[in-house]
Image (spheres, grey):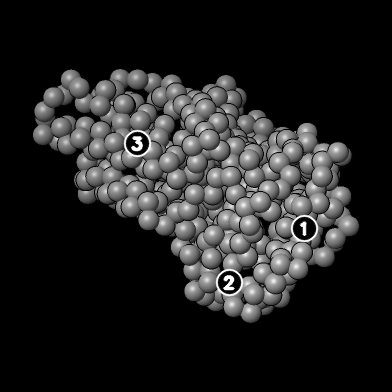
Amino acid sequence: MERRKDDIEKMNDKSEPLLLPENESDVSEEASWMVYLSTIIAVCGSYEFGTCVGYSAPTQFGIMEELNLSYSQFSVFGSILNVGAVLGAITSGKISDFIGRKGAMRLSSVISAIGWLIIYFAKCDVPLDFGRFLTGYGCGTLSFVVPVFIAEISPRKLRGALATLNQLFIVIGLASMFLVGAVVNWRTLALTGVAPCVVLFFGTWFIPESPRWLEMVGRHHDFEIALQKLRGPHANITREAEEIQEYLATLAHLPKATLWDLIDKKNIRFVIVGVGLMFFQQFVGINGVIFYAQQIFVSAGASPTLGSILYSIEQVVLTALGATLLIDRLGRRPLLMASAVGMLIGCLLIGNSFLLKAHGLALDIIPALAVSGVLVYIGSFSIGMGAIPWVIMSEIFPINLKGTAGGLVTVVNWLSSWLVSFTFNFLMIWSPHGTFYVYGGVCVLAIIFIAKLVPETKGRTLEEIQAMMM
């Protein structure tokens, strides 16, 4: 213990990372049923996120016809979700630091449920847009706090797999909107969005708060109770509790984090990795591909509804079988690299199909080329770039920076999502094949970024990851 105290003092005096000897870094790897229950409750927020994003596509014509909306009015309805999500992302870090991870999830669930009910009762575009804005705010907050909560409660050997459930339930929520939206009207579909909010709100009363957050705010007794519940009544939590407490005691001597601290030389790598992954997750063109997927399926002679269901199911299956099962076996970096390479291939297939069409060449293979490109692209996104940036974001930031830095990268994600969606049609007018070649170029940059800067976090405690990054 004396040697550890010396290590902490050395870190405080010289800003050096606390590196634990290998034989002392093993913490409790046991996970009680409470870890799984807590994760399932939390990912109801991820499911809610998916329903918010997926709601507008299957309801477009029903809403426009019943409320007599123009295309421009419906575009406002669709895009205002991003405005609310950006605001939610900006405030998510501070809210989750102030009222806790569970408190932030409860607040988000209430705001989202109110938004869905306003949409259900809407008689014109103004309340419709306001309800959509509220659901956006809720999912913007949830997009940050859910992966952070899961990372902070999970044993390190399960953290990657449990954290990728966040993305899995997002795509399940998306798929549910397409499937249910095919058989019910838009008002009924809005009510289905309330269900995960109710489960999340009441479910959080039956699970423990993040132990790391409890210790950070000085609730030491509650910290030990929560950690014991998460590891099981017979688990020895002494070593894990000591590591968390020593690390947080070290951070307590540091000044309160501000935005300026994010560009400090000690923290800049955390920020570059987090922001960079969120930037590339969106600027590889995922929203553009998904938005144009229906038109590509139409060009191939397939039903756009069937096509949407097909790639939604593909996202669910590959997210479950790929990232969720492999992330703690193969590691984060290999899956990210494979994902970026696969998306590059998908972009080239789609781009080449448009190039051939523009020159009237090989017209008989163009539909198959385009459809296979979409499926390869979306499948590749699902195994890596969809889930893993959120996992790494939840792992790399020190807890004193997690609110500020996590809010920043979530804002970057939502702003990038909006920008890609906004510019896609302009790029397609400029050059359909050029659009996907540009996205392919971004995939190449993503491969270089992952290879040079992104750390492998598999099998490490959160404290070890942050010491390694420093």
Residue at 59 percent of width and 75 percent of height: 15
Q: Quadrant of residue 99?
A: bottom right
Q: Circle 2 is placed at which residue position?
A: 16
Q: Circle 3 is placed at which residue position?
A: 342
User: Can residue 361 be seen by looking at this rendering?
Assistant: yes
Q: Circle 1 is placed at which residue position?
A: 242
Q: Nearer the viewer, mark 3 or mark 1?
A: 1
Farthest residue in the right direction? Answer: 221
Q: Amino acid at mark 2?
A: Glu
As measured in the structure, the alpha-carbon distance from the residue carrying label 3 to the one carrying label 1 is 42 Å
**First-in-chain label (1 vs 2):** 2
Q: Position of residue 198 (x, y in %)?
A: 76, 39
**First-in-chain label (3 vs 1):** 1
Camera-nearest residue between 274 and 156:
156
As measured in the structure, the alpha-carbon distance from the residue carrying label 1 to the one carrying label 2 is 19 Å
Q: Position of residue 305 (x, y in %)?
A: 44, 24
Q: Position of residue 448 (x, y in %)?
A: 33, 52
Residue at 74 percent of width and 38 percent of height: 31
Quadrant including the N terminus: bottom right
Residue at 59 percent of width and 41 percent of height: 160
Question: What is the secondary structure assignment of the residue under circle 1?
Answer: helix
Q: Amino acid at mark 3?
A: Gly
User: Can residue 67 be seen by looking at this rendering?
Assistant: no
Would residue 1 be found to the left or right of residue 318 on screen?
A: right
Q: Amino acid at mark 1?
A: Glu
**First-in-chain label (3 vs 2):** 2
Residue at 76 percent of width and 68 percent of height: 2
Would residue 425 be found to the left or right of residue 215 on screen?
A: left
Farthest residue in the bottom direction? Answer: 13
